[in-house]
Image (tube, coloured by chain):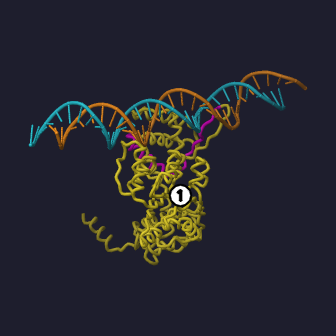
Chain colours: A yellow, B cyan, C orange
Amino acid sequence: MMGITNFFENFLKKDSFFINKKVLLPTYVPEAVIYREEQIQEAANILAPALRMEKPSSLFIYGKTGTGKTLSVKHVLTSMCDVAKNNQIRLKTVYINCKLKRVADTEYRLIAQLINELGEDIPPTGLPTDEVYTIFYALLDKKSCLLLLVLDEIDQLTKKIGDEVLYNLTRINTELKNSQICLIGISNNLVFSENLDPRVKSSLSEEEIIFPPYNALQIQDILRKRAVLAFKEGTLKTGVVEKCAAFAAREHGDVRRAIDLLRVAGEIAERSGSDTIEIMHLDEAEKKVEADKVINAATNQPKQFQAVLYSILLLSPQRKQFFTGEVYDIYTNICQRGNSNVLTQRRVSDILAELDMLGIINAKIISKGRYGRTREIALAIDETIVLKLKEILEKSLGLG
DNA sequence: AGGTATTCACATGAAACTATTCTCTGAGTTAGG
DNA sequence: TAACTCAGAGAATAGTTTCATGTGAATACCTGT
């Protein structure tokens, strides 16, 4: 009893070396966006007509994850909103992330979310989709404003439900009397528009901006800027920022990851009772971030999915690589043992593809000639994670 | 030997089905006038 | 008669099944030398 109280006392007394941890969270929007001035200016040029209530060209933004796309767009939009407010311009901006599960990842939910943003409530299900459209039209027209609609991770949306939604959204303008809508799409996928309906493509990507990855030096600068705000002076050992940046630069310049890494390193250092953040903590953070990612992905999946993953884990210590059929056999066994029903091989094949996407396995389709065509599967995660993951899955699946 | 043709073991696609969650509608019921 | 309840029809969605078609190359099967 005393021990734990002491712990809390000490915890309070020993002031944290975080000044403001929020700065390192992905939701943080910094005052200034550095190394993106060019792109921001270009976007501003394209969107500026909106302030005169003229519909700007629709805009498409490409770039890998963590290259500042979302941040830059948000930055531009907030300043536009400020100006609009000062000058009583009826400009509205809506930002929607299409990847968010149960928020905007289907046609119905996307429109429902839009209606929500305009300040109206809509039931989560039960209504026909075209009725939702009608409500949206009416609502938007009533507002008589210019709407700048940002669809983040738009590639995820079209991959899942096709491009009909986008077509409908671009067509809206011809139906509206008092309002206009301007689409701004953000995509991680550089060849996204290739497999789009040509009608949609032409009306959606009138203008395009490409965000190149940051290089290591730029990442360093960005990290330092944040670190100054987040940590007390002198808590960050030299070399930590450099290593963090180098690591991110290797991974196509993903700053978000780098910042995340820095935060986790800080947390680990704090918990271990150290006064400074060492490179050692960074290494540990790297492992933890990776492990968390995998474990999160796995636990959020349905039972059957977990069963497939579990059979792969069982199979992997014996052999470096194996094939779909072998996984399926083991999986069938597990299901029978766990008394759950067995999925078809067709479905398992899809699950394997998903596991590949999540980066938990490496699957390559190979042909073994006379002996068929199949996926060559290898586990892509660290040994230490495997044990942990195995435990979690066993518990979740109710296996002894 | 050299060239086709087969054939395996899945992959990949499309459509359709199932269970669940939710709304809306309208018939039947209730309570009050 | 107005308000209330409650079953049933209809939607959206996730997860899956069914049916159909595709596919790369190691082997089997020819062919002519």
Image location (x, y in percent) of residue A146: 46, 61
Residue A242 visible: no
Q: From the image, which quarter does the C terminus of chain A lie in? A: top left
What residue would you read off at disc 1? A186
Image location (x, y in percent) of residue A3: 28, 65
Magenta stretch contains residue A123: no
The picture quadrant where one finds residue A341 is top left
- Residue drawn where x is 41% and y is 51% of the image: A136
Image location (x, y in percent) of residue A313: 49, 43
Image: magenta residue range: A371-398
For label 1, the crowd category at 10 Å Cα-Cα, with few meaning under 14, some 14 to 19 and many 20 or more, is many
- Is C28 rendered above or below residue A27? above
- Residue drawn where x is 48% and y is 49% of the image: A386
Between A124 and A302, the residue placed more toward the observer is A124
At label 1, which amino acid type do we have? Answer: Ile
Magenta stretch contains residue A379: yes
- Is A310 rendered above or below residue A232? above
- Is A323 rendered above or below residue A175? above
Residue A122 visible: yes
- Residue drawn where x is 59% and y is 68% of the image: A216
On the picture, is A100 further left or further right than A316?
left
- Is A77 rendered above or below residue A122? below
Between B32 and A251, the residue placed more toward the observer is B32
Image location (x, y in percent) of residue A316: 53, 43
Label 1 marks which chain's residue?
A: A
On the picture, is A156 further left or further right than A395?
right
